[in-house]
Amino acid sequence: MKAWEQFLTLQEIEMGKATVQKWLRNLKISRFDAQNLFLEAQDPFQAIWFEEQIRKKIKGGIPFNGKFIKVHLNVAKNQKLNKTFRKKQNEPQELDTFKLNFDSLDPSFHFDSFFPTKGSLLPLKVLYELTGYQSKGGSLNPANVHHSPYNPLFLYGKAGSGKTHLLMAVAFALRRQGLNATYVKADTFADHVVSAIRAGEMRLFREAYRSSDVLLLDDVDILARKSATQEEFFHTFNTLHLAGKLIILTANKPPRDLDHIEKRLISRFEWGLSLPLELPSKEEMRVILEGKCALLDIHLSPKVADFFLTTFKSGPKALIRALEAFSLRTHMNEDKSLAKQASLYPQALESLIKDLIDDEEKSVLTAEIILKAVAEHFGIRIDDLKGPSQARESTLPRQVAIYFLRSKLSLPYMKIGDLLSRDHSTIMTSFRRIQKGLDSEDEKIAPLVRDIEKGLI
Ligand SMILES: Nc1ncnc2c1ncn2[C@@H]1O[C@H](COP(=O)(O)OP(=O)(O)OP(=O)(O)O)[C@@H](O)[C@H]1O
């Protein structure tokens, strides 16, 4: 069916060929007419994946010849959940091999290597108390997790504010005291749910999670729209909470601002204490840089230290990644004078970590900055770019904006479409038009695009 084939081709661009091959190409087309397409999943696992990853993209149907075709999905009749996934007696090896692989902890993420900043003082105080960690000397008093006055504890902050570092530091401190501290990233939890359903091993899944003394779930915002996983997490949360086990969660926003997370989960997240983690100030970034250099035994000239700080401004995540890359690359390089040069002179450092400097430039750029720059260049409003208007004055600016959103931020066509209220095929055509104009040095397009680009860098 042509409409479905077109949709799959688009998905290959957005999600990659391997993903589409694995999850979408083997959906069977059971029938279709002018308005409906009926698909059949091979098993419930594939259907769950489809509902969580694809359904939102085709809410109104898939576009074809100016119309929308509604997509219906069923699981193949002989593959219903209770039949397929009930353990088969002639497959004992499946029972033996089912295993949940938990995320490993980063060995450098301890309390000792986390430098207190103004915006982390309160979370640190609470975490020190819960784990019994002594900031002076680093020893441990008995942990206080079974009598925590707050449950759950919810840490939130922007990317790089240190959430993962602190969660892992808690896990290390508790494990040193013999406690079963389960650290898991939310997407690993989602994988665990799906593979347990697939293997018919929900009992083992529940046993694994519910035997934790403390559950540390990182980036809970990632569960957005994953309804099957949220359902399971709801039960895991309730069981642990009822048993008086502490749950510590992290996210990029406070509970009430989380999108597409069920209300009943949000209300539970608010039962305990929510604490913000702020990104460090400029001065604090210097303290973190110096502290990290001391830990890695790196000696930088003041000029090179300044270069690191002025180049990697987006937060500690980029700064520390660059510092670690510097350390690794100088160690790996045969030419030992390189390490010396790069720790003394910004120019030598610049060529050593050029790729990371480029990444940082990209991460500082946002969709709003691009739209603002394009709108200002053409003397129109951002709303003219975003709105439904088909007026000729905003067509070229919108195409240029689409080109930058795709080329600078690598945003999926679908996402650009959402941002500019257009369907993804219009977005693809616009992108290609500007790309073609640049390739052929079209005098109406190429100088204009370069001019705007200068303002973005
Ligand atoms: N105050 C700090 N002291 C030492 N290192 C820090 C501090 N804050 C952040 N870092 C470091 O910054 C990097 C990013 O931190 P982390 O991964 O914990 O951030 P995050 O908030 O979990 O980000 P994300 O939301 O993207 O997962 C890590 O290398 C961490 O060690």
Image (cartoon, rainbow, N blue to C red):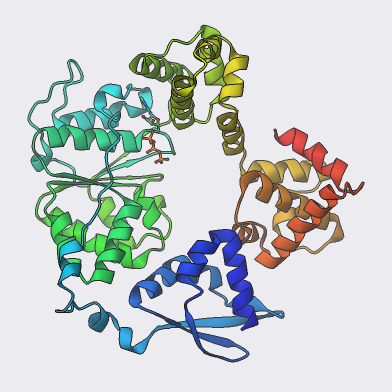
**Residue 108: where, in percent of width, then height?**
30, 28
**Residue 66: where, in percent of width, then height?**
71, 79
The residue at the point 52 percent across, 31 percent down is 314
Q: Locate residue 428: give its quadrant.
A: bottom right
**Residue 121: where, in percent of width, then height?**
30, 26
Q: Is residue 276 visible?
A: no
Question: With respect to residue 206, does 409 lie above or below?
Answer: above
Does residue 407 appear left or right of residue 255 in this picture? right
The residue at the point 55 percent across, 31 percent down is 356
Of residue 187 and residue 16, the one placed in the foreground of this image is 16
Question: With respect to residue 370, does 327 lie above or below?
Answer: above
The residue at the point 75 percent across, 49 percent down is 381
Q: Quadrant of the N terminus?
A: bottom right
**Residue 409: where, in percent of width, then height?**
62, 45
Q: Locate residue 187: give its quadrant.
A: bottom left
Q: Quadrant of the C terminus?
A: top right
Of residue 186 and residue 87, the one placed in the foreground of this image is 87
Question: With respect to residue 412, does 48 lie above or below?
Answer: below
Does residue 140 appear left or right of residue 302 in this picture? left
Does residue 296 appear left or right of residue 32 in this picture? left
Question: With respect to residue 376, does 289 lie above or below?
Answer: above
Q: Is residue 391 visible?
A: yes
